[in-house]
Amino acid sequence: MGSPKTAPRASYHHGDLRNALMDSAVELARAGGPEAVVLREVARRVGVSATAAYRHFSAADELFGEVKQAALARLAESIERAVGAVPDEGDPGDVAVARLRASAEGYLDFAFSEPGLFQTAFHHDDHKVDPADAADDMSFSDSAAFQTFSRLLDEVLAAGRMAPHCRAGAEVAGWSMVHGFAVLGTEGPLGRHLSPQMMAFVRQRTIDVVMRGLTAQD
Amino acid sequence: MGSPKTAPRASYHHGDLRNALMDSAVELARAGGPEAVVLREVARRVGVSATAAYRHFSAADELFGEVKQAALARLAESIERAVGAVPDEGDPGDVAVARLRASAEGYLDFAFSEPGLFQTAFHHDDHKVDPADAADDMSFSDSAAFQTFSRLLDEVLAAGRMAPHCRAGAEVAGWSMVHGFAVLGTEGPLGRHLSPQMMAFVRQRTIDVVMRGLTAQD
DNA sequence: CCACGGAAGTTGACGCCGTCAACATCGAGG
DNA sequence: CCTCGATGTTGACGGCGTCAACTTCCGTGG
């Protein structure tokens, strides 16, 4: 008695090893960032031999890739949540702008509350750039979060809060800003040198700058 | 005959091993990014045993730290060069703005022409955040490049091209934007999914947005 | 002049990692 | 019931960073 899930050593076979490995790997990434996702340690935590993982993943990279996708998904959730929390009342332009701003806040909330997962979501190893095989590599720019961001910019444009000629490339510009701040704050020197109050201040300042840059009317 | 430098196997002792290891390590970082800086490989290239490096560096991390500093220095050079190339004539406000913009171009020029070194410059391992020992970790925010950037913002302010209340936190906002674009373009999904023409376009767009965000007058 | 002490480099070993080949165990379907 | 494929184990390999012990060389003081 006791399902294999609750009694990890119930039998020779695990019963749900793939999911158990994923959970363990995600927890490792959460606590220690991308470098902490070590196949042997993942297996150890699940109470299984290292090579057992090869029945469910072709290699360690594949496991890591799935952890990355999971992290990306949580980032998307954080953004959706923040955007969804904006009250849909008042001037449509104000709402559109507020929603755009909220998406940035949701991005940064995730980055700073789950730095390990955030770094994992954007970790990219190898310098190998084989010819036309880049297609299979799903990433943020294909993710729900990016689509959301794009849609929010369309809304701002439709509400007349952005000069039409500025719309092109705006996703990348806005994303760059928020992402850069997140990277510098979580793994870069910002988080290590600034007090929490300073961090909060420059965070608002940074969002102010990008919002002003995106919603200029000239 | 033949100095130890030109004849690497002239004698048992190398003569200039520390510099030789540094050069080799920097070259590795240049070609393969931070992950490619592997102590044993560095030593192998110099034609020396792996443990020989321990006579000059306390650990592999220390070697890597120096490579990082070298990369940071080259980034600073790239920025200085771009800023220095701006002609110092015409309206002082225009010059200040042009110099600020040039610093961003210099930053991105380096990131895209030397992606391995750029990634190395900002690579940060371990999630260990020991108490008050963060002081010794020199990084970009202490570097010449950051000081330059700060000075350029002061000039823009002094030339009346920036609202005074926007000056605080402007370094971080501008740096975040440029850094984010560089990261997404070199190791992130941008560089892998966009054509060179698109890259050039979004690059200009991104710089436009941050310049507009920083130099707003309201 | 030489011998000697420490600086600089070597070898061999340890424990960690990812991965492979060969073997053991289990449960579902003939 | 018995077999066979899916699942998990063991043992090994090469590569990594690092340590302890050993060797080679060079500059210096007697």
Image (cartoon, coloured by chain):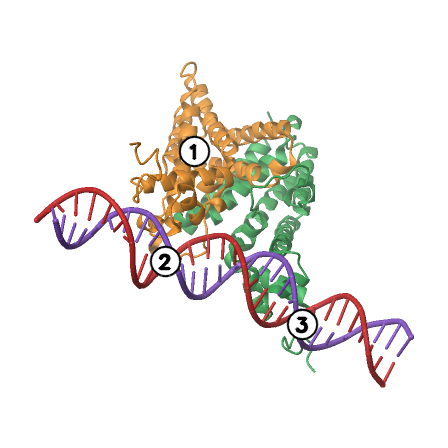
Chain colours: A orange, B green, C red, D purple
The mark closer to the camera, 2 or 1, is 1
- Label 3, on which residue? B14
- Label 2, on which residue? A131
Under circle 2, the secondary element is: helix
Name the residue type under label 2: Pro
Res B190 quadrant in image: top left
Mark 3 surroundings within 10 Å by alpha-carbon count, few (fewer than 14), some (14 through 19), many (20 or more): some
Q: Which mark is residue A75?
A: 1
Name the residue type under label 1: Leu
Under circle 3, the secondary element is: loop
Where residue A166 sits in the image (x, y, percent)?
45, 34
Estimate the spatial distance between the alpha carbons at disc 3 and disc 2, rounded to whole Å: 41 Å
Where residue C17 sits in the image (x, y, percent)?
46, 53
In the depicted view, which residue is nearer to us: B98 or A43? A43
As drawn, is A186 to the left or to the right of A198? left
In the depicted view, which residue is nearer to us: A203 or C4? C4
Res B100 quadrant in image: top right
As drawn, is A6 to the left or to the right of A204? left
**N-term mark: 2 or 1:** 1
Res A151 quadrant in image: top left
Q: Residue at x 57, y 46 (%)?
A: B124
Q: In the image, are marks 3 and 1 on the same chain?
A: no
Where the N terminus of chain A falls, by quadrant? top left
